[in-house]
Image (cartoon, grey):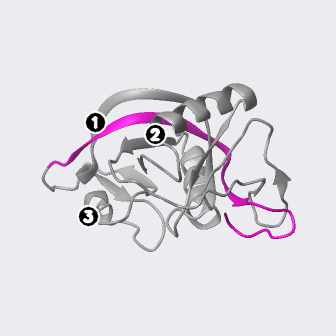
Amino acid sequence: MKVGYHGDETLDEIIQRKTREEKACGILFWGYGGVICHPLNQVSPFVRSAEEQGSGVKLILSVTPSKFHKKTQYAKYYSADQKTWQPMPKGSLITASAFAIICKNFRKVNYQIDISKYEVAIGPNKGKNLREYLSYRTDKACAIYNPQFGRASHPVSIAFEADVVSPYAVFCSPSESNKSQC
């Protein structure tokens, strides 16, 4: 996933807030939006499949200079299934996001991955080369390593990572009466 300025916060402010959130709650909710990486149709099945194969899944974040401006709304409720809603844990804050990936062990890192050696793992673009998939405005994917792709190298710097934990991904809502997305 690409990460940067979001809503009305700088990346440094977001990182500081998420670090405090994990300390307070033991987990953090990494908010995101759009139609890609739907919690029920993509993220949760992807993580469950990886766990069944004995692997964990990491959220990896590369920094983008683009600035996503949106009127900031705060999620007050979350749901793993869009049926049962719970209040956000005290100390958690999701801003301007429809969904959130649930993580722990959030950390700053400094390494590169060659995204031309990965493929989209689930959804309508399953099997597509990640380099091709992440072009233009697409900024996130559930992907797996596939060294058989013979494409030219395309290294991407990874700045942060975290371990994805149950319930993997959730829906967000700003109000109890209107369980719509933020």
Q: Which of 42 and 21 is in front in this view?
A: 21
x and y percent of residue 109 in the render?
39, 27
Which residue is pictured at 25% across the width and 48% down the height? 147
x and y percent of residue 122 in the render?
47, 64
Q: Is mark 2 on a helix, strand or loop?
A: helix
Do labels 1 and 3 touch, CB within 8 Å? no
Q: Mark 3 points at which residue?
A: 132
State the predominant SS element of the stretch in magenta.
Answer: strand
Q: Earlier in the sequence, mark 2 or mark 3?
A: 2
Q: Name the residue under label 1.
A: 112
Span shown in magenta: 153-182
Q: How far apart are marks 1 and 3 (CA)?
A: 17 Å
Q: Nearer the viewer, residue 100 or 175?
A: 175
Q: Is residue 115 left or right of residue 100?
A: left
Which residue is pictured at 83% across the width and 59% down the height? 85
Q: Residues within 10 Å of mark 2 (few under 14, many from 20)?
A: some
Do labels 2 and 1 touch, CB within 8 Å? no
Which label lies toward us, 2 or 3?
2
What's the amino acid at mark 2?
Leu
What's the amino acid at mark 1?
Gln
x and y percent of residue 12 in the render?
47, 34
Q: Which of marks 2 and 1 is nearer the N terminus?
A: 2
Q: How crowded is mark 1: few (under 14 residues within 10 Å), some or many (20 or more)?
A: few
Q: Name the residue under label 2.
A: 11
